[in-house]
Amino acid sequence: MSAADPVSDLQAVFAALRVRLSARILGQRALVERLLVALLADGHLLVEGPPGVAKTSAVKALAEGIEGDFHRVQFTPDLLPADLTGTEIYRPHDGSFRFDRGPLFHNLLLADEVNRAPAKVQSALLEAMGERQITVGRETYRLPELFLVMATQNPIEQEGTYPLPEAQLDRFLMQVRVDYPDLDTERAILALDRDRARDGAGASEGGAEITQAQVFAARRAILDLYLAPEVEDYLLHLVLATRAPADYDPALDGWLRFGASPRATLALERCARALAWLEGRDFVSPEDVRRLAPDVLRHRLLLGYEAEAEGRTADDFIALLLARVSCA
């Protein structure tokens, strides 16, 4: 690579990381891709799927590939806000207090089974995600500039859980759904597990870490990608159609109670830019928007009562929306 083309060099570095992650997290190409998109778009990720499909392994692998510290928090009903934010410790020798920082001060945070924590803990996480700061007592503390939360939730077990409110769901850049791998992938997972057991669990996967400076440079680079007016209009119409679906197709009337917020517009543009940059292009295509629209929109839509009664889902609505709204 030529030093005269730093953007191409950066793209090559992230492409290599993508290959390494895909080699470790078999059968979850979409999850790996969305993790990198969230990193580049400076947003947070909510991942939903059954146990054992590499949700935790994926974010751990990402943490090993970039410069920064990683922490995992298992969310439980007895978790307290201070378990995330930290707490003030009394120092008896001089009568002062010292703030002991909690897990939120790490660069990458895995919030495992986030819907098992009560509302007060979810609120503490909400402030951190939205404001990039936490408040303890009368003091406000800034979080690291590189800060990514990947939260997971299990869609199977709902007993003893606290559903995330719409305000907190909207703070997530994307909601990604993962499923079980197919037969060939599961066979490859078996072979990979045997190789790791034979070579040792701590064997190095190889590859250099991406520095935080490179992450910030990549974030600046995606802002320079060309977004054609036609693609921007397409993106805007997709979001606007969630608020007035009957204007685009009378058959969609009554599907939704609330559509996507302007935050969805910003998120979809940032994600589409990040995906185009990851693919090595200098422009955003309509396909970038279509590919990420379900993950950006599904958790921001509130279905109507009739749609819920008929067993319809947000994904059903988005599929119809993508079929009805076209790029000029």
Image: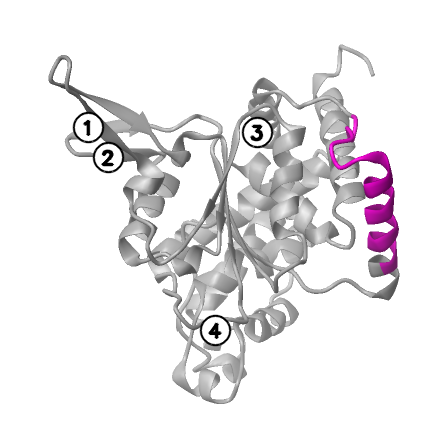
Type of amino acid under label 1: Glu
Label 1 or label 4, whichever comes before in sequence order: 1
Dominant secondary-structure state across the stretch colored magenta: helix
* Distance from Cα at disc 2 to Cα at disc 1: 6 Å
Q: Which residue is mark 2?
A: 135
Q: Is residue 25 magenta?
A: no
Identified at 56% across, 54% down, the residue is: 235
Q: Which residue is mark 1?
A: 139
Q: Are marks 2 and 3 in contact (CB under 8 Å)?
A: no
Expressed as whole percent of the image width and height from the top left, the position of residue 171 reads 41, 49
Residue 219 image label: 3
Structural crowding at the residue carrying mark 4, measured as other residues with C-alpha within 10 Å and reported as few (<14), some (14–19) or many (≥20): many
Structural crowding at the residue carrying mark 2, measured as other residues with C-alpha within 10 Å and reported as few (<14), some (14–19) or many (≥20): some
Q: Secondary structure at mark 4?
A: helix
Is the C terminus in the top left, top right, bottom left or bottom right quadrant? bottom right
Q: Is residue 313 left or right of residue 287?
A: left
Q: Secondary structure at mark 2?
A: strand
Expressed as whole percent of the image width and height from the top left, the position of residue 78 reads 32, 55
Identified at 51% across, 80% down, the residue is: 252
- For residue 40, what is the image quadrant? top right
